[in-house]
Image (tube, coloured by chain):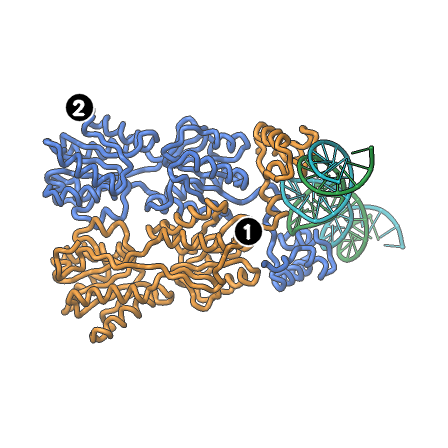
Chain colours: A blue, B orange, C cyan, D green
Amino acid sequence: MAKKEITIYDIAKQLNISPTTVSRGLNDHPAINIKTKTKIMDLAKELDYRSNKFASNLRKQSTNTIGVIVPKLDSMFMSSVISGIEKIANNAGYNLIISQSFESEEKEKNNAVTMFNSRVDGLIVSLSNQTKDFNHFKTFIKKGVPLILFDRIAEDLPSTKVIIDNFKAGYTATKHLIEQGCKNILHITSDLNRNVYKDRFEGYKKALLDHEISYKPELFITNDLSESAIIDCFKNDVLKRKTLPDGIFITSDFAAALAITTLKQAGIRVPEDIAIIGFNNDLICKVTEPTISTINYPGKEMGESVARILVNHLKGNGDLGITNTVVLNTDLVIRKSSLKKNKNKT
Amino acid sequence: MAKKEITIYDIAKQLNISPTTVSRGLNDHPAINIKTKTKIMDLAKELDYRSNKFASNLRKQSTNTIGVIVPKLDSMFMSSVISGIEKIANNAGYNLIISQSFESEEKEKNNAVTMFNSRVDGLIVSLSNQTKDFNHFKTFIKKGVPLILFDRIAEDLPSTKVIIDNFKAGYTATKHLIEQGCKNILHITSDLNRNVYKDRFEGYKKALLDHEISYKPELFITNDLSESAIIDCFKNDVLKRKTLPDGIFITSDFAAALAITTLKQAGIRVPEDIAIIGFNNDLICKVTEPTISTINYPGKEMGESVARILVNHLKGNGDLGITNTVVLNTDLVIRKSSLKKNKNKT
DNA sequence: TTATTTTATGCAATCGGTTGCAAACAATCA
DNA sequence: TGATTGTTTGCAACCGATTGCATAAAATAA
């Protein structure tokens, strides 16, 4: 199959010098004569030589590789994050190994083992919703491999964390609806096992409390926010209720878009009858009718931020302690789906 | 930093057996006594042993790693593809190294070199629009590393290719608009340098020809299909024309969605005044008003297909010759944005 | 011309598994 | 009991680059 590989020994032999010199020449070592270097480089190019990273890594005990484990790759948010990570990591000379846990603790564990054996220099993780045990990550910490969690984190895992203030975001979104005159705000969200959704939920409750609206369990729904789940939840539950909510805070823009579509089909006006606010600020928000108000969650910046912290740490410029938490800003993006008042706003 | 690593030698010493036996035991070699195996496994676990992939790869001359280079990660289509690749590759025991070319030939070249030095067992690529020279890929072919191109390919690169029939898709989309009564069909697409957009354009022209509609250059626009480009193209060009088109075939669903929004703002009805068809069958199609007719381009299946072909090839079960081309099916998905007639259809 | 730096190169050990071949031992058959 | 087969294990070479230390060669100083 593959033809014979050229090694530094082949180059050394042809040039009648030692492999040591070849290695140094290739790595631009200062002690090597410039003419020798040129000879080495030239021959290397001519022979299509490629350095064997495994031999090199084995000897140097470092891999220049960063591992990434996320629940799923196929969402706009996650692909933005990954894109941001890749950009920074690649510029800093790191390779990226990426895998998905598909929301399964089992798979996450397997992926972690692989990353561990691949000896990634650092690991970036967004947790699966199912994960309750963290031993597969503690192994990294034990060995001194830096671990960074983002978005879906676990408080009690001693690692750097990059998150948004989900509580505040939930609070802000809910408060906005309240300010639009909503009294019966339905909150649709996902698995409370993880910080993201739980904190938003807490923010939602706090906003109600602060505005003297009592929390009603029937105005709280969790599901996986998939297309079928959302449609089912509206058609078989929400729309059949005798009193409809007058506002909905739903933690996904796509789900919000589906909600709008479903409600409109049922003859309900958005935002007049029901005001809606989503989450993430996905592109989709701009093209629905009405456009969707949402919380801007900057995925790409989060990815870049995560990667930058890790790279700095790996290069030894890390001022960050290992258990620091970085909180990125989110903003309320007001569009039409939530505007019961001030109809003239953007 | 990192604590001392446990090696098979440490295990061997503690168990008073040879490293050979430890290695075999860890790899479940049939010649090793089951009791010995158990002893080895137990101690390995107890000591937090992890296999050194570099030593192993170095000796075995294979990496169990697949490289992926794509123009950009942050689109729904691409993240679906990647998700599909990861799923298959991971199940087959391969790691994935991913990088982005950001549509730059330069970056693509650098990424290829890195992948080459990382000795990926196989390489999966969707070309950047800018790429005109393919020497950085020929290196792989020379060394016998399987190369698979998908979506954005180059005809003259001898590798396996996984694509859709872009010509047919373009033809189908255009024909559908014609059948809806459109006579002046605007085609908005991206860089003709690559097969994808060029073939769709050819399909568009052929459909016109077959229906005795002459091709008019002013009804053909290329740009990068970004939000700003689309909005600009409508506000400063299309909407200012004295005769508006009565149909638009635009090769991106998001762009189609923006087009609809912009047209509606200008008081033009979709599909009554202008019928629109997009491309990809993104989630977004279902939540706009009207919903968007499109060509279904199955990203996830494409990713799975690509990975499956490569994995089979690597495992030696590849029946596929190295220059075969796999063409995946696409279908016309009719929603509301294109329906001038039969308004009662889905 | 001899002693001292400076510059350039090489020796040999090392990183940690893997594997062909041989050997030790136990089990089965005549 | 001796011969044959099968089961386990170990020896030692190997994969290819890196690096501390030593040395040769050239340049400079004395």
User: Element at badge 1?
Assistant: loop
Which residue is label 2 attached to? A214
The percent coordinates of residue B290 (x first, y second) are 17, 53
Position of residue C21 measured from the top left corner of the image (x, y, whole percent): 74, 47
Kind of residue at badge 1: Ser
Judging from the image, mark 2 belongs to the subunit labelled A
* Residue at image location 23% in from the left, 69% down from the top: B219
Q: Is residue B289 visible?
A: yes
Work out whether B143 lies above or below B288: below
- Left or right, D20 with reference to B298: right
Label 2 SS: loop
Q: Quadrant of residue B8?
A: top right
Q: Residues within 10 Å of mark 2 (few under 14, many from 20)?
A: few
For disc 1, the chain is B
Distance CA(mark 1)–CA(mark 2): 59 Å
Tell me the number on the disc at residue A80: none
Amino acid type, mark 2: Ser
The vertical placement of B84 against A207, above or below, is below
Quarter-wise, where is residue A203 in the image?
top left
Q: Quadrant of the N terminus of chain A?
A: bottom right
Identify which residue is drawn at 15% across, 40% down: A339
Question: What x and y, as percent, mark residue B86?
Answer: 43, 47
Q: Residues within 10 Å of mark 1 (few under 14, many from 20)?
A: many
Q: Nearer the viewer, residue A139 or B59?
A: B59
Where is mark 1, residue-wise?
B118
Q: Is residue B114 visible?
A: no
Q: Is residue B189 left or right of residue B147?
A: left
